[in-house]
Image: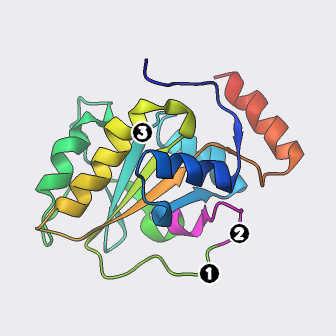
Amino acid sequence: MYGIKDPAIESKESIYKYATKINLDTGIIYTVDTTAYLETFLRIQSSVPEAELFSKEGNNISYKNHNQDCNAGLFSFIPDLKKDSTYKQKDNYKLDKNISRLRDLSGLKLNENIKDNSDYYLFIYWVKWLGKLNVDHVNEWVKLAKANKNATIKVIAVNLDFQEWWSDKFKDNIIKRMSKK
């Protein structure tokens, strides 16, 4: 019913094709370096779709209440973000470190600086195999960020599918490790 499928190894083309199908801007899609893949999953508590929010100063902002584990709070947090407000810091993980781990969907290090004059940076972690949750969550978070009139929010959609550009050894290793969870 939700279109959830078994994970598969995805190519740049298959990810872009799917993103176009669900009306997700392909210009904001990146992935992470293989050295950061497992750590990224641990950071987001193996939950996708998920998000991390950073201030322009580079601080990782907590959008969850102390008693909340799910990402539902993001639906109300994004519209309430204000340009010069101060928010609770989640941890000491910084924006520059997160950006340095990004790769394009061919696995290449970014030759562009994605930092600009935005007030906030919203990293949305997603996988193709989650089907309708990408529309219900990912697309909705993107729309909410674009609609915020009180702050500029740059959205970076980080695809965490198994990538075709990975080495065979890494693919085998990561698939084994992920299937144990």
Q: Identify the residue under disc 3.
A: 134
Q: Quadrant of the N terminus?
A: top left
Placement of 166 over or under 58, stated as above or below: above
Foreground residue among 25 and 127 = 25
Q: Residue at x 51, y 81 (%)?
A: 113
Reply yes or no: does residue 104 show up in magenta.
yes
Assess disc 1: are there few (<14), some (14-19) or many (≥20) residues with their C-alpha within 10 Å of its C-alpha: few
Q: Identify the residue under disc 2.
A: 108
Assess disc 3: are there few (<14), some (14-19) or many (≥20) residues with their C-alpha within 10 Å of its C-alpha: many
Q: CA distance from mark 2 to mark 1?
A: 8 Å
Report whether residue 70 is seen: yes
Q: Identify the residue under disc 1.
A: 111
* Disc 2 and disc 1 in contact, CB within 8 angstroms: yes
Q: Residue at x 46, y 55 (%)?
A: 157
Amino acid at circle 1: Asn
Q: Position of residue 47 (x, y in %)?
A: 47, 33
Q: Secondary structure at mark 2?
A: loop
Placement of 111 over or under 6, stated as above or below: below
Q: Which residues are magenta?
A: 98-109
Amino acid at circle 3: Asn
Q: Residue furthest right?
A: 169
Q: Secondary structure at mark 1?
A: loop
- 146 to the left or right of 103: left
Placement of 92 over or under 73, stated as above or below: below
Q: Residue at x 38, y 52 (%)?
A: 52
Q: Position of residue 104 (x, y in %)?
A: 63, 65
